[in-house]
Amino acid sequence: MEYFELGGSGLRVSRVALGTWGLGGGSVWSDHDSTVKEAEDLISACLDHGINYLDTAPVYGTGVSEELIGKAIRGRRSELVIQTKCSLNWRGEGGNFHYERDGYTVNNDTRPEAIRRDAEDSLRRLGTDRIDSLIVHYVCPTFPVEETVGALEELVKEGKILTYGLSNSQPGDLDEYMAAPHASAGVSLVQEFFSILSPFHGREYFPVCAKHGACFQTYGVLEEGFLTSPEFMERQFKKSDIRSRIPWTAEDKKAGLRRAFAVWEEIRAAHGCTFAQLAEAWALSQFGQMSLLVGMRRRETVADTARCLDVRLSGEELELMEDEARPIQEKILDK
């Protein structure tokens, strides 16, 4: 496993991070509801492979993911860097409507009182006295940035969080957060979608991250499984499932992705790796301060993902991979 410092936070994190959206279950991930034992085994597998960086959020199953993780990390909290999020809550205390799902109305609220309440709720569900990294889940222009930053910095001073970051944002948001009057700790990372099928947002962000010394943490690098194998494309999902709504479920996109897989097969075979490892290795090659956030629920997936760091693609291979993906790339995704 490779390790690096998360922005200027002093936190030493693994290049690969465990994403736990899937642990939340519910209608978004409709094929499985996880147990505490499964969460314990998953985290054990991560530690076995040197993965110490774990990401979750309050709205992943409206508290379910955090609660499972809280129980699963008992006795080994010190071995892990725990990252969760704020701004999305279902308390009915204000903010902007974000979505309705599974009987809950979720609002986006970055007011100081909401940020603090989100952090306190997460500390309780996770059963810990600190959150290593707290991410603003959806940057919201409705409320003053300086007030949001002020609340985050206060939590840093109190030791309740060690650092903070942004997600679902724009490069200008990072500039604005870093320029806020109270931003002494500053943003250490941004967490945004990025894959060979949708690379545009990340590439716009990379120079701004470099300017501020922030890490870019990519999610969606496997496009919810569609880049793991040609066979995955043939699966059927419920309409509420996130995997039923991404562009590559459309037949014309599937046809293009099948053609890409046919070309990528030669590269995959040359490196003796899986298609998932190939897509992950491509993503990691695109920016130096890249963190690979991958949703995993099984021990074998953890082992497979960790090995992506052994895949070293040549410049020619990288270009060939994207040449084949370019006809079906999408700039804007609804996830």
Image (tube, rainbow, N blue to C red):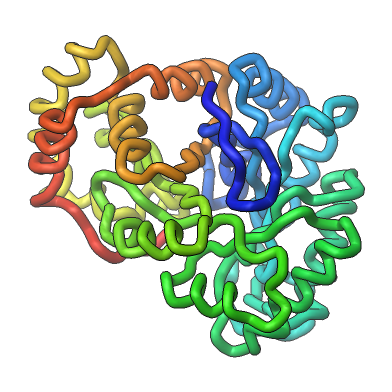
Q: Is residue 61 visible?
A: no
* Residue 115 image-quadrant placement: bottom right
In the image, residue 294 sits, relative to residue 314, either above or below, namely below
Residue at image location 52% in from the left, 56% down from the top: 214
Where residue 90 sits in the image (x, y, percent)?
73, 70
Task: Report the residue at 85% width, 60% height from top.
Answer: 121
Q: Which quadrant is home to the C terminus? A: bottom left
Say whether residue 39 is visible: yes
Residue at position x 83%, y 65% in the image? 155
Give the left or right position of residue 187, taking residue 173 as reference. right
**Relative horizontal placement of residue 101, taking residue 322 as reference (left or right):** right
Q: Quadrant of residue 204?
A: bottom left
| Residue 185 horizontal/vertical position (percent) | 71, 64
x then y, percent, for residue 278: 29, 27
Image vertical order of residue 124 relative to residue 282, above or below: below
Q: Residue at x 56, y 55 (%)?
A: 189
61, above or below 48, in the image: below
Q: How many labels sit on residues?
A: 0
Tell whether 93 sits left or right of 4.
right
Image location of residue 245, percent across then percent down: 35, 56
Report the side of 44 relative to 17 (left or right).
right
Please tell me which residue lies in front, 35 or 56: 56
Q: Nearer the viewer, residue 46 or 90?
A: 46
Q: Nearer the viewer, residue 121 or 22?
A: 121
Q: Quadrant where the N terminus lies? A: top right
